[in-house]
Image (cartoon, rainbow, N blue to C red):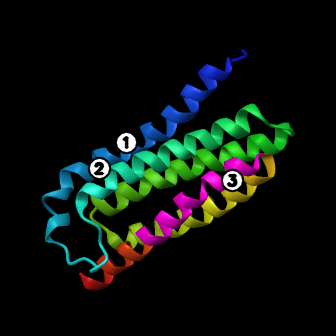
Amino acid sequence: MRLSKTKKFLISVITPQLAGLIGSLATMPKIDGWYATLEKSALNPPGFVFAPVWTTLYLMMGVAFFLVWTNRRDKFEFRFAAFIFFLQLVVNTSWSIAFFGLESPVLALAVIAWLWLLIVLNIVLFYRLNKWAGLLLIPYLLWVSFASYLNYMVWILN
């Protein structure tokens, strides 16, 4: 079945947003309760920052995926890059479940370490297929690096 570019674009940008929505189901119930009671880093942004940042990052991930999906040169290389992309989305969602759902900063720290490595691999693979697709994932890596620090500080301070 061949999909039009419009359908590929919609699938590409909606899929990461759905991953974020699933993660938010574990996150939202804990924000005003468990999370509010934790000691956090002085660099911890105010709560209202997270939703727009993540929404933007998920949009950039979707556009990056669309670029490699519609501009692929090597079928095997694309399939492997797509596998890593979807795997990192699953791990991304797993972080929210570990940190908020299970209330386990230490487990979440292990998950985010794997996520960070998968994002780096994803950047390399996407860059090989489409330079802009790889570059679009760099802000995601930077934010997850900062989130790793915030996660670590919650673990240490609590």
Residue drawn where x is 67% and y is 22% of the image: 5
Of the pair 117 and 9, the residue shown nearer to us:
9
Mark 2: amino acid: Ala
Q: In which quadrant is the C terminus drawn?
A: bottom left
Q: Which residue is mark 2?
A: 26
Q: Nearer the viewer, residue 106 or 14?
A: 14
Q: Which residues are magenta?
A: 130-147
Where in the figure is residue 120, as x and y percent of width and height? Answer: 65, 63
Please rate how many residues cluster around mark 1, counting C-alpha atoms within 10 Å: few if below 14, some from 14 to 19, many from 20. some
Measured along the vertical axis of the image, is residue 61 above or below residue 66?
below
User: What secondary structure is marked by label 2?
Assistant: helix
Q: Residue furthest bottom?
A: 156
Quadrant in the picture for the N terminus: top right
Provide residue 81's location: percent of width, then percent of height.
72, 47
Callout 1–callout 2 Cβ contact below 8 Å: yes
139 drawn magenta: yes
**Measured along the vertical axis of the image, is residue 132 above or below residue 106?**
above
